[in-house]
Amino acid sequence: QVQLVESGGGLVQAGGSLRLSCTASGRTISAYSIAWFRQAPGKEREFVARITKSGNIPTYTDSVRGRFTISRDNAKNTVYLEMNSLKPEDTAVYYCAARGTIGAYPYWGQGTQVTVSS
């Protein structure tokens, strides 16, 4: 079973950048498709971005496309979410999740807070 730990969150001004990391332990991250989700206060959790096991097919939700970049370094057992041109509406707890096959994501990290001030 894989364990996931997110890091890199923090407080940033609008227009700024952050890079989130999702580091795996227990199993090699190369065996999993990884996704980032986020949940803002009072809102449902929403999909942000996804990267396949091979890393050559990233997918983004419309609101972050062109601003966020998901990538993976299997040698470091880590997936990244580079976030640029941040907006106050990007404020949320960001979670990474893993799945070995198509379907639901059974493995989740504990989340990291991202706060964007206006």
Image (tube, rainbow, N blue to C red):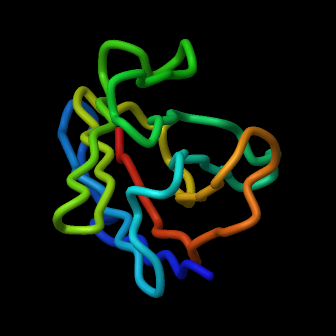
Q: Is residue 73 above or below residue 56?
A: below
User: Which percent across, then down, holds residue 52?
Assistant: 47, 35
Residue found 25% across the figure and 57% down from its top? 74
Q: Nearer the viewer, residue 40 or 59?
A: 59
Q: Is residue 65 left or right of residue 98?
A: left
From this view, report whether residue 87 is shown above or below residue 7: above
Q: Is residue 97 left or right of residue 42?
A: left
Image side of residue 84 versus residue 29, left or right: left
Front residue of 42 and 62: 62
Q: Residue at x 41, y 15 (%)?
A: 65
The spot of residue 104 in percent (x, y) is 81, 49
Residue occupying image coordinates x 56% and y 53%: 92
Q: Residue at x 44, y 42 (%)?
A: 53
Of residues 38 and 90, the one drawn nearer to the viewer in this rendering: 38
The answer to whether residue 9 is left or right of residue 44 is left
50 w.r.t. 13: above or below: above
